[in-house]
Image (tube, coloured by chain):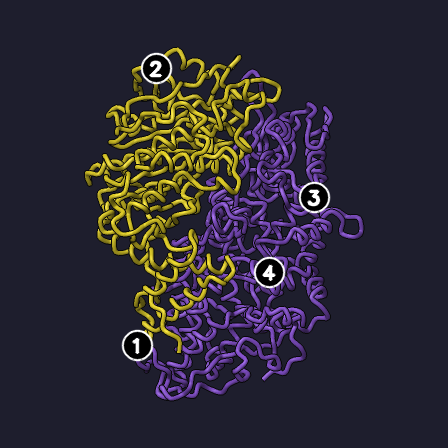
Chain colours: A yellow, B purple
Amino acid sequence: MKDPVDKEKRRLLKALAALPLGSGVSMLAGNGQAHAMGCDNAKSLVCIFLAGGADSFNMFVPGGSRYTDYRDSRRELAVAENDLLSVNDAQQGSFGFHSLLPGFQQLYTEQRLAVISNAGPLIRPTSKSDYLGTVALPQSLFAHNTQQKLWQTGAGIVNGNNAFGWGGAISAHAANCNGNIPVAPAFSMGGSTDWLASAKSNYVSLNADVAVERMYGYDNISDWIPPQRLSRVGRSLNELIAQGQQSGNPLLTRAIANAVGRASDATSSLHAALKANPLPQMQYNGSNKLAKQLHLVAKLIASRGQLGMQKQVFFVLMGGWDTHSDQLERQPDLLTALNEAVTSFQATIDDINLASSVTSFTASDFGRTLTSNGNGTDHGWGGHSFVFGSAVDGGRVIGETPNYSTTNNPDDAGEDDGSFAGRIIPKISVNQYAATLSRWMGVSEAELNQALPDLQNFTETNLGFMNA
Amino acid sequence: MKQNSHPVIPRWLVLFGLLSLPLIQACSDAGVVVGNPQTSTGGNPSSPGSTPSGGDLSEPEGGGPTGETPPETSVSNLDPADVAASRFLTQATFGPTPESITELKSKASYAAWIDEQMALPVSIVEPYTRANSNGSNTEPRHEGWWNNILGGPDQLRQRVAFALSQIFVVSDLDYALANNQYGMANYYDMLSRNAFGNYRQLLEDVTLHPVMGVYLSMVRNEKANEAENIRPDENYAREVLQLFSIGLYELNNRGEALPLDNPKPAYTQNQVEEFARVFTGWNYDRVSSWETNNLGSGDAFTTPMVPDERFHDTGSKTLLNGRVAPAGLSTREDMTFALDTIFQHPNVGVLMSKQLIQRLVTSNPSPEYIERIVNVFNNNGAGVRGDLAAVVKAILLDSEAREGHLSDPDFGKIREPLVRLAHLWRALNATTGPLAEGVHATPSFDMHRVDEMTGQAVLQSKSVFNFYKPDHTVVPGGNTLSPEMQIMSEANLAATHNNYHHQVYRFNERSNLNDDNPRVTLIELRPLVELAIDRNALLDWYNLVFFAGGMPDDMRQTLFDYMGTLGNDDSGRFARVQDTLFMVLAAPQFHIQR
């Protein structure tokens, strides 16, 4: 008979399999790595991705004389001036958050939230004449999937060599810090994502709508398989995984075998840690899917110790932002849910005294057109993002406020006939935003330059919104 | 023991030393000994060392059944014609069954089976949905679909319709569509009806379907109003180009976007804006005014949208390939002109062919395979472009579909989670449990959390980009595609695994059900228990039905050895079936269709 293959042996086999199909553990990892460069303080970074292209120009609105331009370009979609929740920026004057984002206003006032104004994918600084001329532009502008990919990879053109996410570069660094533990330090609650794609480290993909379950049959878990058979069933299941992982197998076979093995290992470790940290203080409407995801994130942050994680990276996703129609009906629900999820999450992180080691930020496919298509907006380019947490040097607007004027607007990519569309050309590159956040997580300059090759095209590579 | 004519392996393959491929062994008959030359052929009697007293007695770990019998090697013994038929049905249906394999073999040819399938009446979902849903309840639409998938005779049409539903995507996760289940069902039936029709008609039916009108906001899209800064909605215009017809980049007929490092866009933002102007002026049928909220008696979502010329942009529009829709065309004339323009674009056949191949046969078709199918799309032999029946037939009968697995290790695909589940239920005669007088007092399979469990549910993807993207790679930045791998997450794998556990151990015909399990689907294990007296016979059944002859040798041996630790009386055989069936369903190897 063959030797039984137990879980440890399978781990060993997996470790021999080539990454990234192999284990969730970075192959860079070894014992004692926790004292490597940039690993000193425990930190977690949370990406809140607003899928579909959020109309962030209605989330954060200029005040004063610039409000008139905003109102004239947005027409019936404009947020009424009286409804805005006022805040001030020392350099740029008054602004207002949408009335349904009081939690954002509160964090801004506490100087724990910064607004990154008009950011988006750029290969190099791009003016309107550059846009109309021959300057290299990001690939397939205005299409959902490519713009998500460009945001998440920081690349201008997506091909084989730069298909890795900048979150993935952070996760590889995190895996290096964490050393040899069974679970990868990166988690997606929003399904597959390019942001966490890495050649060096995997990420764990969880469903926040259901509890993390252990897999029956493995680890002697089953109330239904008689105990006399259970351990042998488990051994056979592990043996089948090990067979699938053999190096001579086709790529698909190895990939799915590794995925099944990872699922069994990860759910087993996470189940115990999550049970120990239920964090009941996080309160939200049960149908708020983003809040559910952030609740799971909070539990995993609270479980840093049990999981042996010094650094963690999270990706959560909220859909529904592609408001081509009925924007005035759809947007309130979206903003209400976002505000509730963010507020409750941050309160929970404050409660467990980890606020200075947890930073969260928003990103989206693109900003939307300033102009209306009748009752909604179409795909734009630049948009606002929000970064929050106690490590954020907040209460500030980072970057220039875009020009909202409907005539001779230097920031508008425009319509084909030259008329106004309000497709705003970004002034801040995803690369600059990404670099600032990555450095906070401890990623080295060398790792940064590798992850974000276009970063060198920008003078300012640290936007200064993170406290050291 | 079956006596076969000849194995399907070409002699040159044997000569070239590819003997270690498990598939070849599986395809070989008893007369050709491969892989384990020292072993006698299959068809062993019952396990020699089995204990008579039942399934729960076990030997010490690592020991054989008695410790006295020499290790025994299990060898597959299948009829190559059965294996070939099973492979074909894995691609063309929601999973082979012993009966469907026999039926296929009784036909003159696979082509004849395809012709018969295409001529069958269309199984539809809308009547069932109307009978059981108030329009907002989503479950009956799924139940109706499952009933067709599991029991409908028009399997090929249903499989193709499901593929089309993943290209021409709508989803009732959208808030406006959740309450329009009759429309959702009608949309799916529209895909089923068009599955073997012409792509051009399909594109028009998709374009004018009110459910699509809502999903991609073409309904009530109006011409520009410059005084108000209002432009036409670009939503449908963009996605019809990117997802339903030509894609982002110029393609050759081999499916390659060139140049690889920065491919040439197939259209520009300006062209999207021009198409947006084309698709203005459409409203729900039989409404009293452009913007009324009263959509009438409920047919607004099951009848095609109608034009309202007042809101149509009648200016000229520069579309693709230099084609200009002249000024003054009516709403419908403009749409016809635009869809004709799209239809004539050389990319259309490439995008459709490659994605249909990916859904049915393999994730990484060779450029030559793609080109052969594109040629059929472009001309079915009788001068017709866009003949989907000819395309589907060519995809399934192509030499690469039939024999690609023999030479290409990367041939095949990850099975779609719903197809995998459907296959289990079809193969093991799934029935509704006795306590399942369900939500609607109708026969219903257990639909609870099917999307959470599998990451997939019919017409319920998270966005118009489907459950997964056609260009998702196994390794980030790699070349090998596997769309389905995108949803093989820890969460989905764990949930499906545990569901299979419950299915095997808790929900079969011997289960004692109680009120905690009011709505369950039961599988029937009895036929397998009868086979389990002979471990090899049971393994051959799995190998034929679930693996189309491709169960790897080492996996087979693991199951064989495991069963040797169990008894061979009724409870031992039942244990053999439960444990090995669970292992089969849980195995990474079963996730792959080759």
Q: Nearer the viewer, mark 1 or mark 3?
A: 1
What is the chain letter for disc 3? B
* Residue B505 to residue B163: above or below: below
A230 versus A121 height, above or below: below
Spatial CA distance of label 2 from label 1 is: 72 Å
Looking at the image, is mark 2 or mark 4 nearer the viewer? Answer: 4
Q: CA distance from mark 2 to mark 4?
A: 62 Å
Residue A137 visible in rendering: yes
Q: On the image, numbered disc 4 is attached to which residue? A: B408
Give the class, few, some or many, for how many residues have Cα within 10 Å of label 2's Cα (few <14, many ≥20).
Answer: some
Q: Are marks 1 and 3 on the same chain?
A: no
Left or right placement of residue A300 versus residue B51 in this view: left
Under circle 1, the secondary element is: helix
Provide the secondary structure element on which disc 2 rests. loop
Which residue appears at 67% of the width and 47% of the height?
B254
Q: Position of residue A421 (x, y in %)?
A: 54, 21
Type of amino acid at the residue the image marks with label 2: Gln
Q: Is residue A299 visible?
A: no
Question: What residue sits 60% from the left and 75% below the top?
Answer: B28
State the residue position of label 2. A92
Chain that bears disc 2 = A
Amino acid type assigned to the residue bearing label 4 in the image? Asp
Work out whether residue B434 or residue B457 is closer to the camera in this orientation and state it: B457
CB under 8 Å between discs 2 and 1: no
